[in-house]
């Protein structure tokens, strides 16, 4: 059932992107099934250490929550355990922060055992100090929104001993889950090493949440696999994708690569969560190439690119070459593209950039060509004439080059081929000028 909520933010010194942040908080709430009916903003020079908002504003929030019938108030930031406790002392609703929402979304979307454990560990670690510091108000929150496990236990009226007991239980649970996680990760790494041995190039889709990564993946699946059951979930919802899915793309010209669709990034992604997801994001870290999908129709696309690049650095993937796929071109007004020459330069002529609409298929051919060019940079094209008596060489050409055309002539076979440097050296003597 949808809950009614109010979002709360402190705009410190007229901070850049403050309003976009609040907008995003509404989308995050929506993903948690909370309908935002109002917002409360305080302009201030700093965040209040004890209560996040100033005292007067906090009282105002309490009143607003009552008049709007809100069940939840959500702070656009990370509350410390004591801020959480102090706010709960004044406001008569469930109190959540941005991190709670993100953890909740991740918890509800996680499907594999590994993803579930990862989120749960981080969630319990986040809630643990808040559990210890909390008073009876916490009991309202104990079930967590969406009925998660929360930090366990109904604490209403509980004394210190009960809290200590809860704390130990939670810690034990975290330890047990971490042990299981380690085993799962070892298993997965073994599988991945197996795949590495096959030496198939890997490409990872990365980008801000809702940019269109899964849509790009599905376009490729339709194009190269053609099986609907291989498609992944694409949805206008933050964090639609949580697990990495890998699909093998077989291009016409014998080239193939593994494409992986991954979780999207968001600004202020809880640091611990990034760390926890490092293991599933290892797919990204070991990719030969990244496709950085950008929602170009979003006004804030530049800062979304920055957030994504920062997160990539945090997980140790900052060094991997990337192609920028500026997506949702169909939503950009054409005059914006045409009028703005500078923009045009950024969008179209930069070597590693393509403008696409994954939904409509525009620019996807160029994107695929660019991927091939990056993955197989040493590919050479040549027209060659191989005398008929060189059967072994012909067999080699058939097996290890991409034949664009072949005609039998009197002196031998004329091929137009694409091949790597090494093969080229073997056929160089037969190249037709
Ligand atoms: N108009 C338009 N919509 C698009 C395009 N590409 C994707 N979308 C829509 O954008 C929304 C998000 O797309 P997804 O592919 O799920 O995005 P994602 O990057 O995988 O998102 P997360 O998994 O949540 O990180 C969906 O509603 C898509 O239909 C496009 O080129 N044009
Ligand atoms: Mg997705």
Image: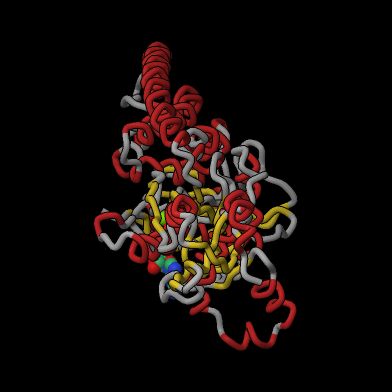
- Residue 283 in view, yes or no: yes
* Residue 80 in the image: above or below residue 106: above
Question: In the picture, which quadrant includes the C terminus?
Answer: bottom right
Tell me which image quadrant ligand 2 sits in.
bottom left
Residue 151 percent location from the top left of the image: 38, 28
- Report the residue at 40% width, 55% height from top: 249
Residue 194's image quarter? Answer: top left
- Residue 163 in view, yes or no: no
Residue 384 percent location from the top left of the image: 56, 66
Count how many numbered circles sit on residues in the image. Answer: 0
* Residue 313 in the image: above or below residue 1: above
- Report the residue at 40% width, 17% height from top: 179
Front residue (pair 217, 108): 217
Front residue (pair 398, 20): 398
* Residue 405 in the image: above or below residue 270: below
Color theme of the render: secondary structure
Residue 349 percent location from the top left of the image: 68, 74
Front residue (pair 150, 415): 415
Q: Is residue 123 left or right of residue 417?
A: left
């Amino acid at each position: 059932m949808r809950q009614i909520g109010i979002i709360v933010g402190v705009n410190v010194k007229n901070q850049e992107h403050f309003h976009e942040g609040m907008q995003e908080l509404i989308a995050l709430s929506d993903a948690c099934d909370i309908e935002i009916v109002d917002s409360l903003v305080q302009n201030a020079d700093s965040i209040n250490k004890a209560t996040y908002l100033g005292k007067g504003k906090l009282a105002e929030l309490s009143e607003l929550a009552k008049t709007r019938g809100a069940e939840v108030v959500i702070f656009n930031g990370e509350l410390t355990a004591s801020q959480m406790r102090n706010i709960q002392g004044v406001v008569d609703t469930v109190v959540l922060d941005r991190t709670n929402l993100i953890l909740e979304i991740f918890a509800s979307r996680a499907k594999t055992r590994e993803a579930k454990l990862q989120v749960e560990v981080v969630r319990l670690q986040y809630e643990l100090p808040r559990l210890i510091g909390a008073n009876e108000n916490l009991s309202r929150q104990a079930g967590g929104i969406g009925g998660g496990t929360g930090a366990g236990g109904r604490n209403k009226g509980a004394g210190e001993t009960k809290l200590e007991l809860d704390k130990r239980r939670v810690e034990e649970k975290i330890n047990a889950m971490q042990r299981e996680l380690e085993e799962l990760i070892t298993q997965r790494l073994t599988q991945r090493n197996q795949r590495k041995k096959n030496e198939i190039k890997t490409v990872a889709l990365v980008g801000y949440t809702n940019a269109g990564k899964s849509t790009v993946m599905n376009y490729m699946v339709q194009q190269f696999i053609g099986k609907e059951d291989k498609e992944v979930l694409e949805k206008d919802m933050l964090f639609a994708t949580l697990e990495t899915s890998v699909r093998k793309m077989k291009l016409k010209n014998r080239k193939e690569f593994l494409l992986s669709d991954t979780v999207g990034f968001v600004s202020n992604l809880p640091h611990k969560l990034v760390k926890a997801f490092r293991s599933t994001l290892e797919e990204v870290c070991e990719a030969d190439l990244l496709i950085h999908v950008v929602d170009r129709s979003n006004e804030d696309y530049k800062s979304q690119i920055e957030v994504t690049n920062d997160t990539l650095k945090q997980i140790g993937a900052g060094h991997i070459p990337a192609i920028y796929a500026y997506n949702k071109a169909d939503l950009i007004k054409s005059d914006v593209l045409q009028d703005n020459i500078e923009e045009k330069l950024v969008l179209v002529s930069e070597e590693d950039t393509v403008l696409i609409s994954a939904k409509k298929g525009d620019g996807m051919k160029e994107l695929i060509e660019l991927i091939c060019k990056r993955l197989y940079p040493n590919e050479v094209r040549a027209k060659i004439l191989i005398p008929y008596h060189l059967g072994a060489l012909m067999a080699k050409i058939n097996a290890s080059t991409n034949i664009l055309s072949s005609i039998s002539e009197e002196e031998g076979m004329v091929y137009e081929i694409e091949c790597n440097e090494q093969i080229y050296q073997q056929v160089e003597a037969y190249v037709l000028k």
